[in-house]
Amino acid sequence: MKRGKRYAEAAKTVDRAVQYDTADAIALVKSNASAKFDETVEVHIRTGCDGRHAEQQIRGAVVLPHGTGKTVRILVFAKGPKADEAQAAGADFVGAEELIPKIQNEGWLDFDVVVATPDMMGVVGRLGRVLGPKGLMPNPKAGTVTMDVTKAINEIKAGKIEYRLDKNNIVHVPVGKASFTQEQLADNFQTLMDAIMKAKPSTVKGAYLKSVTMTSTMGPGVKLNVAKLTN
C-alpha cells in the first residue's frame, strides 16, 4: 500500500521496537494527526481468543465518558407507543416492515446504529445479510435489542460504542477524535480497556491481550505496553 509523504514523516517519529506508555502513545498519535479533518483515534486490540468457539467470543458495549466526537445516526425498529417513544428520545429514523425494501432493494444505509424492540427482531432478521456484514445487527449483549428504547438512544448519543472480535480475533474501536485533550482520550481509553479486561473469556489459553495499537485515521500505529495495561 503506497503511503504519502506526510505518513512517511509521521512514521519516523514512532519507534516500532518500543511499546509506549499510554500517555506517550496518545501524545504521539495526536501530534501525528495532521490531516485537514479531525481524525478519529482508534484502538486495535489483538487478542488470544479463538472466535470460532462461542465461549471465546467477546462482544459488548461501553459508554465512553467523553463520547466519540462523532454524531451518531440511530435507526429504531419499533411500533406503536415504542415508535413514539423512540421519536421523542431523538432517534434519527423510526420504522417497521416498510423499511425492509428501502434497505434491501434501494441500499439505504444512512445510519450508524440500529436499535430494535424484541418483538421486531423477526422483521430485522430478514435484513441479516445486509446488516450483519456491516456490524449493524441489533444485539441484546450490546443493549440494542431492548424495550427501553429511550435509555438505548440516550446512551448511544452520549458515546456508547460496541466492541466485538473480527474474524482475525481483533477488536477495532474508536476512542475519540484527535482534537480531544490528552486527558479525554486517556479516560476513554481506560474505560474501554476496563471493559475489555472484564469481558475476558475464562477459557482463553495463554495471553489474552497480544498487542494493543493506537492510531489516528491517517497516522501510523503506536504500540502500547501490554504488560502495564493488564496490571
Image (tube, rainbow, N blue to C red):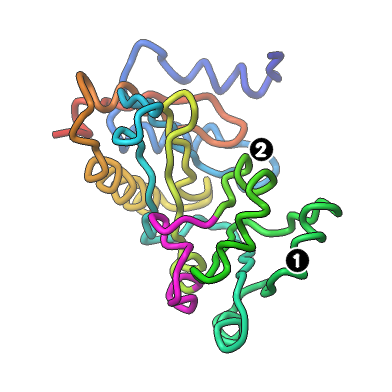
Disc 1 element = helix
- Of mark 2 and mark 1, the one earlier in the sequence is 2
Residue sitting at 47 percent across and 53 percent down? 180
Q: Residue furthest left?
A: 231
Quarter of the image with the N terminus is: top right
Residue 135: quarter of image:
top right
Disc 1 marks a residue whose amino acid type is Leu
Q: Which residue is identified by label 1?
A: 99
Residue sitting nearer the eye, 191 or 83: 83
Binning the other alpha carbons within 10 Å of mark 1 as few (below 14), some (14 to 19) or many (20 upward) gives: some
Q: Secondary structure at mark 2?
A: loop
Query: Crowdedness of circle 2 by 10 Å Cα count: few (<14), some, many (20+)?
Result: some
Query: What residue is drawn where x is 40% and y is 26%?
Result: 52
Can you give x and y, in whole percent of width and height, for residue 204 in the image?
23, 27
Task: Work out whether residue 5 or residue 159 is closer to the camera in this orientation and state it.
Answer: 159
Q: Quadrant of residue 85?
A: bottom right
Q: Residue 36 appears at what percent x and percent y? A: 70, 42
Q: Nearer the viewer, residue 216 or 35?
A: 216
Q: Which residues are magenta?
A: 138-153
**Residue 128 image point, x, y percent:** 63, 48
Q: Which residue is mark 2?
A: 35
Q: CA distance from mark 2 to mark 1?
A: 37 Å
Question: In the rendered structure, which amino acid carries the disc numbered 2?
Answer: Ala
Q: Residue furthest right?
A: 106
Which residue occupies 57% across, 89% down?
A: 81
Q: Nearer the viewer, residue 59 or 223?
A: 59
**Residue located at (47% from left, 20% from top):** 13
Is 17 included in the stretch rendered in magenta? Answer: no
